[in-house]
Image: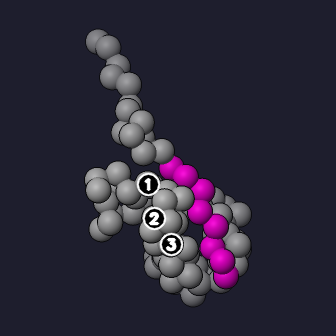
Amino acid sequence: MTVRQDERLVDGPLLPVRCRRCAAQVLVRKSSWEQTSIQWTAEARAACPELAADPFETCPALRSAIQEAALTGSITVIDE
Protein backbone atom coordinates (compact mmCIF):
# COMPACT_ATOMS: atom_id res chain seq x y z
CA MET A 1 0.00 0.00 0.00
CA THR A 2 1.31 3.46 -0.89
CA VAL A 3 0.56 6.59 1.06
CA ARG A 4 -0.63 9.49 -1.02
CA GLN A 5 1.12 12.79 -0.32
CA ASP A 6 -1.09 15.48 1.18
CA GLU A 7 -1.08 18.33 -1.36
CA ARG A 8 -4.00 20.39 -0.05
CA LEU A 9 -1.81 23.39 0.82
CA VAL A 10 0.36 23.38 -2.33
CA ASP A 11 -1.82 25.94 -4.16
CA GLY A 12 -2.42 28.05 -1.09
CA PRO A 13 -0.23 27.71 1.96
CA LEU A 14 -1.14 29.16 5.33
CA LEU A 15 0.22 32.71 5.57
CA PRO A 16 0.70 34.92 8.63
CA VAL A 17 -1.75 37.71 9.39
CA ARG A 18 -1.42 39.97 12.44
CA CYS A 19 -4.34 41.53 14.29
CA ARG A 20 -4.06 45.32 14.50
CA ARG A 21 -5.78 45.44 17.89
CA CYS A 22 -3.82 42.90 19.97
CA ALA A 23 -0.95 41.99 17.59
CA ALA A 24 -1.82 38.28 17.73
CA GLN A 25 -0.44 36.54 14.64
CA VAL A 26 -2.33 33.62 13.11
CA LEU A 27 -1.85 31.56 9.96
CA VAL A 28 -4.54 32.04 7.32
CA ARG A 29 -5.62 30.44 4.06
CA LYS A 30 -8.43 31.90 1.92
CA SER A 31 -9.89 29.18 -0.30
CA SER A 32 -12.57 31.61 -1.48
CA TRP A 33 -14.09 34.91 -0.37
CA GLU A 34 -16.58 32.89 1.68
CA GLN A 35 -14.15 30.34 3.20
CA THR A 36 -11.24 31.16 5.50
CA SER A 37 -9.06 28.74 7.46
CA ILE A 38 -7.40 30.16 10.55
CA GLN A 39 -4.74 28.34 12.53
CA TRP A 40 -4.32 29.81 16.02
CA THR A 41 -1.10 29.39 17.95
CA ALA A 42 -1.05 29.25 21.75
CA GLU A 43 0.61 32.69 21.77
CA ALA A 44 -2.09 34.20 19.56
CA ARG A 45 -4.88 32.70 21.69
CA ALA A 46 -3.29 34.14 24.83
CA ALA A 47 -2.89 37.59 23.23
CA CYS A 48 -6.47 37.94 21.94
CA PRO A 49 -8.88 39.41 24.52
CA GLU A 50 -11.87 38.55 22.29
CA LEU A 51 -11.19 34.81 22.61
CA ALA A 52 -11.30 35.04 26.40
CA ALA A 53 -14.95 36.12 26.13
CA ASP A 54 -15.95 33.46 23.58
CA PRO A 55 -13.33 30.89 22.49
CA PHE A 56 -15.54 29.70 19.59
CA GLU A 57 -15.84 33.10 17.92
CA THR A 58 -13.28 34.82 15.74
CA CYS A 59 -12.10 38.23 16.82
CA PRO A 60 -13.78 40.98 14.74
CA ALA A 61 -10.51 42.92 14.53
CA LEU A 62 -8.72 39.82 13.23
CA ARG A 63 -11.49 39.20 10.68
CA SER A 64 -10.99 42.77 9.50
CA ALA A 65 -7.21 42.27 9.22
CA ILE A 66 -7.75 39.08 7.19
CA GLN A 67 -10.20 40.82 4.86
CA GLU A 68 -7.77 43.69 4.36
CA ALA A 69 -4.92 41.25 3.66
CA ALA A 70 -7.06 39.54 1.00
CA LEU A 71 -8.13 42.83 -0.59
CA THR A 72 -4.57 44.17 -0.75
CA GLY A 73 -3.11 40.88 -2.03
CA SER A 74 -1.06 40.10 1.08
CA ILE A 75 -2.81 36.74 1.07
CA THR A 76 -4.22 35.05 -1.99
CA VAL A 77 -7.87 34.12 -2.46
CA ILE A 78 -7.36 30.79 -4.22
CA ASP A 79 -10.76 30.30 -5.90
CA GLU A 80 -11.02 33.74 -7.44
Circle 1: residue type = Thr
Q: Which residue is mark 3?
A: 68
* Label 2 crowd (10 A; few <14 / some 14-19 / many >=20): some
Residue displayed at 31% across by 60% down: 32
Q: Is residue 27 visible?
A: no
Magenta segment boundaries in residue numbering: 14-21
Q: Is residue 5 magenta?
A: no
**Is 77 on the left-hand or right-hand side of 61?**
left
Verify CB contact (< 8 Å) between mark 2 and mark 1. Answer: yes
Q: Residue furthest front?
A: 72
Q: Residues under labels 2 and 1: Cα distance? A: 6 Å
Residue displayed at 45% across by 64% down: 70
Circle 2: residue type = Ala
Query: Is 18 in front, or is 69?
Result: 69
Query: Is 30 in front, or is 71?
Result: 71
Q: Is residue 15 magenta?
A: yes
Query: Is 66 in front, or is 44?
Result: 66
Q: Secondary structure at mark 1?
A: loop
Above or below: residue 29 compared with residue 24? above
Residue 73 coordinates in the image, percent (x, y):
48, 59
* Label 1 crowd (10 A; few <14 / some 14-19 / many >=20): many
Q: Which mark is residue 70?
A: 2
Circle 3: residue type = Glu
**Is 43 on the left-hand or right-hand side of 38?**
right
Q: Residues under labels 3 and 2: Cα distance? A: 5 Å
